[in-house]
Image (cartoon, helix red, strand yellow):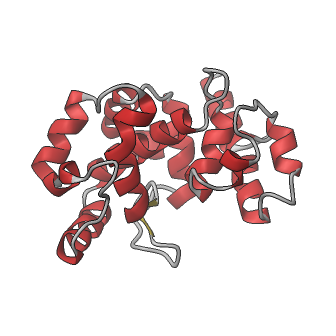
Amino acid sequence: NIKTKYAKSIEKWGDAFELFEPLVVTLIAIESRGEAVGKNSAGAIGVMQVKEITVRESVSRFQLICKTKLPEVALQDIKQKAPYLLALSVNEQKLSSSNTVKLEKLLKDDIDFNIMIGCLCFRFALDFTKANGECQINKAIIAYNTGVYGKINSKYKNQNPSTLSLYKDKSSFVKETRDYLAKALGVNGYWSLYAKLLN
């Protein structure tokens, strides 16, 4: 249903940020079950449950971390809908209260924009957590859930842990985060179910 409902946006932004379609569908399924929900207690908004602080961080530091500019199609979308994000820099990531309100409303009401920003933030997490020049989806999934500056960065920096070892690391990750990882990549997780649908 998610794939059908948001097919155009998933394909467009998945391609723009070089993310597999099953990954984008999986994130939407875990985060919101495909519903354009309002801000939750953690401050996450919309179908991809992105936080305003994560948006600011990911947009302002995208080129620094990902070693590439924002995709032109994403840049144009941001220029049109949220140009104040492009005024942010690596050293200045604050938004005015009025722009914060605008951004949060946009993330809730514009599903295509929410999916674009979610893909941008995940690509940022993917590059931020890479080790030895290689990206690991399991680490990026945890970073998307908890933020890039948590234990996934401090404890596992420059390491390529297995998904099972991350899941078993109770000292670093709370049950919610470990369950999030299992929902995405575990046996009968969303990615596994998606693969079964393709077969």
Kindly identify the residue that appears in the image at 23 percent across and 77 percent down. Answer: 97
The picture places residue 44, in percent across and down from the top left corner, at: 46, 66
The picture places residue 99, in percent across and down from the top left corner, at: 19, 69
Q: Name above or below for residue 71 compared with residue 182.
A: above
Kindly identify the residue that appears in the image at 20 percent across and 37 percent down. Answer: 75
Q: Name above or below for residue 68 compared with residue 3.
A: above
Please give left or right for residue 144 compared with residue 161 in the image.
left
Please give left or right for residue 58 compared with residue 29 in the image.
left
In-front residue for pair 180/98: 98
Residue 191 image-quadrant placement: top right
Kindly identify the residue that appears in the image at 83 percent across and 48 percent down. Answer: 167
Residue farthest to the left, as pictured: 80
The picture places residue 46, in percent across and down from the top left corner, at: 39, 62
Residue farthest to the front, as pictured: 91
Residue 113 visible in this rendered orientation of the protein: yes
In-front residue for pair 85/112: 85
Residue 93 image-quadrant placement: bottom left
In-front residue for pair 57/82: 57
Kindly identify the residue that appears in the image at 66 percent across and 46 percent down. Answer: 153
The picture places residue 43, in percent across and down from the top left corner, at: 46, 72
Residue 30 visible in this rendered orientation of the protein: no
Q: Name above or below for residue 101 compared with residue 173.
A: below
In the rendered image, the quadrant that contains the C terminus is top right
